[in-house]
Amino acid sequence: MITDKNNFFKLDTNHTTYLFHVLESGHLEHLYYGRKIRCMDEYRLLQEPHAIGMAYTVAHDQEDTAFCLDTLNFEASGVGKGDFREPLVDVVLPNASFTTDFLYHSHTITDGKPALTGLPASYGEADDCQTLEITLRDAALQLDLILSYTAFPACDVIARSSRIVNHSCDGIKLRRAMSLQLDLPDKDYTLVTFDGNWGRERRRHDRPLEYGISVNDSKTGNSSSRHNPFVMLRRENCTESSGDCMGFNLVYSGNHAEIFDVSTYDRVRVLTGINPFAFGWELKPGDSFQTPEALLSFSTEGLNGLSRRFQRFANDHIVRGEWKNRERPVLINNWEATYFDFDEDKLVAIAEAAAPLGVELFVLDDGWFGVRNDDTTSLGDWFVNMDKLTHGLHGVCQRVLSLGMQFGLWVEPEMISEVSELCRKHPDWAVRVPGRTPSLGRNQMILDYSNPAVCDYIVDVLSQVFSSCQLSYVKWDMNRNMSDVYSAHSGEGEFYHRYMLGLYGVMERLTTAFPHILFESCAGGGNRFDLGMLHYMPQNWTSDDTDARERLEIQRGTSYGYPLSAMTCHVSVCPNHQTGRTTPISTRFNVAQFGVLGYELDLTQLSPDHRKAVTEQISFYKEHRKLLQFGDFYRFERPEQENAYCWMVVAPDQSEALMGYYRVLTQPNRTSELLIAAGLADDKLYDVDVIVQPMHLDEGGQAVFCGNTEKDHFCAYGDILTHAGFRPKQASSSHYGNSDAMRLMGDFSSRLYYFKAKKQ
Ligand code: GLA
């Protein structure tokens, strides 16, 4: 997997190779990252010749005027010795100088992977992965930069991080400490990012890399839905199903930056890690700083191939504990059903309506504590509101359990309301700048998790809540971005990262103390959807926007970097609370089932038709849950000018698969689509069935069962289905002339196709 020979390093995974070597000067020259190649001594072919001094450059070495750092590719770069690109590390010394030059000192190769102290990180056993640690030293400063590389062959992922150790007798200030540097030899890439905001998270955007610097980042104090830390570089001809691409992600939930510096020598430097914006860290003599972990993967099988690598990696090497690769329950959440207006009987009525439908878990959302009847008060007061829940959490929990369902609870422990007992007692625990009126977000302030006393308090108070009834699930919310950042517990530039270290410490303690609880992370929908959170909490609320049409785009975007098991998806009421749109309940389910399914509506109000539909949906989902949560996911290029969506999930052994086809707006007078499957085994014979819940909207916008019982069944080999495709029955946009030979496909309609391999 990892070989070293004469100062030449080769990291192999099953399908990729990463190469670099130590130059005579001691710098690490990056040579190659891409599809797997055989390479030992031939690596010299890849070395950058530097016999002639380039014009207007700074020679690193007085004895070798042709050797200039600006024109080579490196594994790690500092500042001030002639490399004018963005650096991996930037420090400032007490005398205000900031030149650094990190040169090879030593290295080790070990089986497995050490943990990163205080930070979430990927993990693996000795037979899963191997780790190379290279120590670079700036002898003049007595400063070490330790680069860590772990190769995970089966997933084709390389995990990287940096550690900076101050061996000098002086304090040093870090101004930047990034996790990964990758210098690529050409700039012919399209950058793909996932951008958005509340209610419209992680929409894919593509643009060609150009000269200068492009930055994808977050300054909100969390990983943010504005720009997710997962990004890709693809070659121009790379599609969902073929072509070369590489992806980068961070195992981190705070301010991040992905920097693409395209030099006028036509090279790209990629840097990922903590955002240098407003960052600083005091390194006293003997101190070290560990960066978060960065992940890197490469695929020749298009964007789907890259997604599969990251999805498997998250399931196998990021998510931990009892819920790792374990099927997640179908839940009902009361938020959109009641908002803050509930009592024990109202909640139990929803649970009573849910149990016979097959729902397995009842989740009590916001409003159960303090005097919280709207979003202006009580965050921090984690004791039960006995006016609403007259028999406490225990009372409502017992009634839910007696229905044969599990009980779950919402908390938002990183926040403090100005109107709360906690704020009256500990005004200094709220993050704000002395002498300034704090700006509020959703009427609340951030609790200072850089203060160890706050963290201890939260662990104590939540431990009491979590032990007060038989709790199976916790939804951990975080409903504002950070402002007015200051803490007496953080030095200049340190707050954002110290906050994250405090938060990770709290999560580590609580998830260890309550290993059976399924934690779901949430941040005003999907404002903190990242691998740092997934390390502690195996699933994440994808978006507050539950509109099926919007969810097509949100879930599609999220799937590029994250597994279906991480995405929670709810069927909610129509007209939808976020968009006012009405979509058929079959489509709401057909979208939500590709992920972890839940319902979030007042089930006591369901019509008999809808009760029947939901019962069928849940039973179908349970039958195929493993496939839908842990299968290999394939997206198709958006057919019909984005008026339709199609995706598919395939069992890893290719024994079964489900395809979802979604029509956005209907159009008359169309021929039947050609649907082409993906991921099936060429030589397996599949039974293919259309799964249809024939519900359509009546003139008043209400969903009703319609007479069309559309049945379609056929048998075909995987090679026909994946290389040639199949045509479903012709679609009609209206009820006129309705017959079994056609499909009724109105606005926002959808179909499922189930593929089952015959026993051979
Ligand atoms: C956030 C969450 C919602 C809900 C509310 C409660 O917006 O994303 O799902 O829990 O908070 O206040």
Image (tube, rainbow, N blue to C red):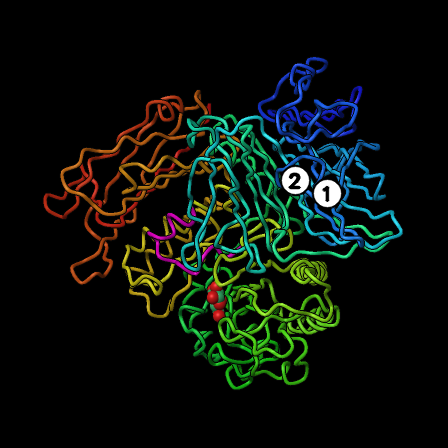
- Residue 193: mark in rendering: none
Residue 376 x %, y %: 49, 79
Task: Give 15 or 222, whichever is nearer the viewer.
Answer: 222
* Amino acid on which disc 1 is placed: Ser
Q: Position of residue 417 (x, y in %)?
A: 56, 78
Magenta span contains residue 554:
yes
The residue closer to the viewer here, 558 or 517, is 558
Front position in the image: 611 or 99: 99
Mark 2 CB within 8 Å of ligand 1: no
Element at label 1: strand
Q: Which corner quadrant of the image does residue 45 belong to?
A: top right
Figure quadrant of residue 669: top left
Whole-angstrom CA distance, mark 2 to mark 1, is 7 Å
Kind of residue sitting beneath label 2: Leu
Residue 13 in percent (x, y) is at 65, 27
For marks 2 and 1 on the same chain, the one whose residue lies earlier in the sequence: 1
Q: Which residues are magenta?
A: 540-555
688 lies left or right of 59: left
The number of numbered badges drawn on the structure is: 2
Which labelled disc corresponds to residue 180?
2
Residue 715 sits above or below residue 493 on the image: above
Q: Are marks 2 and 1 in contact (CB under 8 Å)?
A: yes
The structure residue drawn at horizontal position 68% and vertical position 60%, both measured from the top left corner, is: 493
User: Is the residue marked by circle 2 packed among few (<14), some (14-19), or many (20+) residues within 10 Å?
Assistant: many
Kind of element beneath mark 2: strand
Residue 37 lies in what quarter of the image? top right
For the view shown, which residue lies furthest in the left direction? 737
Question: Which residue corresponds to mark 1?
Answer: 162
The residue positioned 83% from the left and 44% from the top of the image is: 141
